Amino acid sequence: FAISYSQTIDWHDKQKGQQQVAQSELSSALAELESLRLSLASELLETIGNVASNNQITAFSKQRTVILDRFVQLAKQRFAAGDISRSEQELASLSLSEAIMQHAGNGAELIQAKSDYFRLTGEEPDARFSFPNQLPSKLPGTESDTSLIEQHPDFRVAWQAAQVARLQIHTADLERKVDPEMSVTAGRDDDDMLVGFSLSIPLSFRNDLGTNVDVARAQSLQAEQQMQQVQRTLSARIKNARARYKLVSSAWAQWFNRGNLSLQQRIEILEAQWQSGEISTTDYLLQVQQTLDTRITSAELHGNLWSAWVEWLSGSGTLSNWFNLSN
């Protein structure tokens, strides 16, 4: 009988190369997880903003229907008393009909926003959803862009992919190199004890696996180009997000600091002027519409401010930092 044992010697330390690739792939997977979290968190914050903004807009549009409905009743009374013409009464009714249609459209958008939130969370949105009136007035300057890009999860995903591809070149090159194989055989032939030792080195004549190295190099080049593309995309995204936020926050600050009369005060003043004959029915409706439209536009601007802020946090990859500071 005979017992034989053979072992391939890792002469070129292929195991270390494979471990480096595996570690780099693990880092890449973790970076992808962080990128996914950023994407989902950004989408959730954007959806919360849509719910809050559409809540405000729908509330204002509802107020418009209530105000115009009351005005229609007053117009009917004044028409019956001969104070206004039929055309003025009909104009009031048409304004109410338009307000009702606009409110229906605003309500549909609110339903869609709530549906988007439910799709993301599986829960109904809180009716108290709101976002702050004041957000940071200044953002980091362009000198920080390089650092923001390098720390962004999307760039780290691309960078890790390029690292894996570079290591794959080295691994593929190692695979071309043959490793010696050592074997030991022990046995007995009748009364004689036999021991044998052999060392063999395979020779690669027909296939030296050079094609695998070429493929790895091509994949590495592709990964490098993708990383550069991600870098350019993030650079443009940060630049655009900064410009958008600056524009919207400036407009919101001007509106917020104006200190306008409350909506109810404004409507009461206009109604008193109309009742006393200082302004016509047409002028009253025009000014009421302008007042209410401005309120609705301000709610839309507030929503745009939040959206621009979320885009900055997402584009710059600073959402987690901001969220931790806010809690």
Image (cartoon, rainbow, N blue to C red):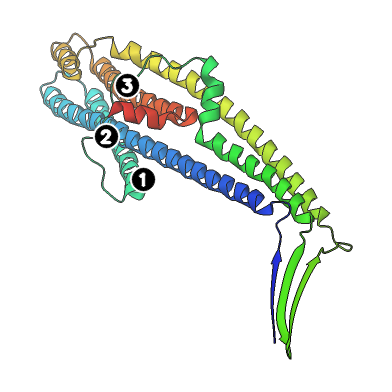
The residue labelled by disc 2 is 55
Do tag 1 and tag 2 residues touch (Cβ < 8 Å)?
no
Q: Position of residue 121 (x, y in %)?
A: 32, 48
> Which tag, 1 or 3, sits closer to the chain's start?
1
Q: Nearer the viewer, mark 1 or mark 2?
A: 1
Q: Position of residue 104 (x, y in %)?
A: 29, 40
Residue drawn where x is 51% and y is 25% of the image:
148
**Which quadrant of the view contains residue 305?**
top left
* Amino acid type at mark 1: Asp
* Amino acid type at mark 3: Ser
Residue sticking out furthest to the bottom: 190
The residue labelled by disc 1 is 116
The residue labelled by disc 3 is 298
Q: State whether residue 288 is above or below residue 156.
A: above
Quadrant where the image shows the C terminus: top left
> Which tag, 2 or 3, sits closer to the chain's start?
2
